């Protein structure tokens, strides 16, 4: 399991209700979404700063494996990902050896062989308007996550359902690209729709800490919807019992 996949799993894990003040404080400090920073090749030198500011993962665009080694040492606390200029197996293997934890690839240009490096994590940049059949097939690829665009604001129910469609059919965690000043309401809506982490541009690195604070302050994952679903069965059973009583009276 890649470091990114492990962090997604931990952030997405349902949390039990806190008991006592100390437990509540610990709950507040545990983020329920990851914070990622995407850097261009020219911004690669900011990887260490991003990690120091609390980034859970850093994605560097098209960096040479020789330069990646230096950045991997600086960003040791963060999962380091690379979007290779050309996604072929040899390039991915070289990036892994240089310290990359995961690779970001796309469906159109990445060669299928690039997914064969078993010790490498993979994030797939999902094209817009992916069909249902494609999404269902993605669930069998063992991807760490899918990289998607957050719904355009204002986030209507229709746009939110499209995001939920991707998460449900693919059975894969989502990473959503968002503006760094996204408010808490948007963050909570995204999280509750299958988004395990948010990605901001390197130019907004100065806003990362404030973003992380908003994520840490989000309410815990609720169980209201699950409880509502469970309550449907007793209601139906009660109706069936009522119908039986009516038949007996006849």
Image (tube, rainbow, N blue to C red):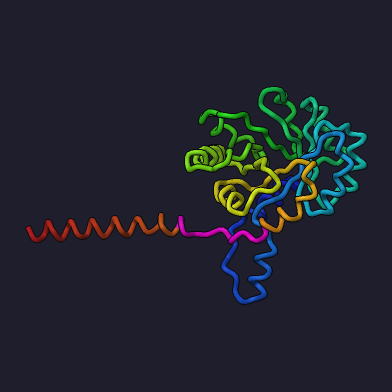
Viewer-side residue, 241 vs 193: 193
Image location of residue 13, percent across then percent down: 61, 56
Viewer-side residue, 93 vs 192: 192
In screen coordinates, is 27 left or right of 237? Answer: right
Residue 71 occupies quadrant: top right
The furthest residue to the left: 250
Does residue 142 show up? no
In screen coordinates, is 69 left or right of 53? Answer: right
Using the image, determine if residue 33 lies above or below residue 175: below
Using the image, determine if residue 134 lies above or below residue 247: above
Image location of residue 82, percent across then percent down: 79, 36
In screen coordinates, is 2 left or right of 138? Answer: right
On whether residue 225 falls in the magenta region, the answer is yes
Residue 10 occupies quadrant: bottom right
Using the image, determine if residue 50 lies above or below residue 239: above
In screen coordinates, is 145 left or right of 161? Answer: right
Report the span colored magenta.
215-226
Viewer-side residue, 109 vs 178: 178
Using the image, determine if residue 85 lies above or below residue 23: above
Image location of residue 121, percent across then percent down: 73, 40
Does residue 15 show up? yes
Quadrant for the C terminus, please. bottom left
Q: Residue at x 66, y 65 (%)?
A: 28
Viewer-side residue, 57 vs 50: 50
Q: Residue at x 62, y 54 (%)?
A: 184
The furthest residue to the bottom: 20
Q: Residue at x 68, y 46 (%)?
A: 198
Image location of residue 140, percent across then percent down: 60, 35
């Amino acid at each position: 399991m890649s470091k990114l996949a492990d962090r997604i799993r931990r952030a997405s894990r349902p949390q039990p209700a806190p008991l006592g003040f100390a437990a509540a404080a610990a709950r507040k400090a545990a983020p329920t979404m990851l914070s990622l920073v995407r850097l261009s090749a020219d911004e690669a030198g900011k990887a260490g700063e991003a990690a120091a500011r609390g980034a859970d993962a850093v994605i560097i665009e098209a960096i040479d494996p020789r330069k990646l080694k230096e950045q991997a040492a600086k960003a040791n606390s963060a999962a380091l990902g690379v979007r290779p200029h050309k996604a072929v197996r040899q390039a991915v293997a070289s990036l892994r050896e240089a310290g990359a934890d995961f690779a970001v690839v796309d469906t159109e240009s990445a060669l299928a062989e690039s997914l064969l490096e078993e010790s490498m994590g993979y994030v797939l940049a999902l094209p817009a308007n992916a069909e249902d059949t494609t999404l269902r097939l993605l669930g069998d690829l063992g991807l760490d996550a899918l990289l998607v665009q957050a719904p355009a604001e204002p986030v209507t129910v229709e746009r939110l359902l499209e995001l939920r469609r991707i998460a449900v059919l693919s059975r894969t965690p989502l990473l959503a690209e968002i503006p760094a000043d996204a408010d808490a309401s948007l963050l909570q809506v995204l999280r509750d729709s299958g988004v395990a982490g948010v990605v901001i541009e390197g130019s907004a690195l100065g806003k990362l800490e404030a973003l992380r604070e908003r994520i840490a302050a989000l309410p815990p994952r609720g169980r209201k919807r699950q409880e509502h679903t469970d309550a449907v069965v007793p209601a139906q059973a009660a109706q069936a019992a009522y119908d039986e009583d009516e038949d007996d009276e006849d």
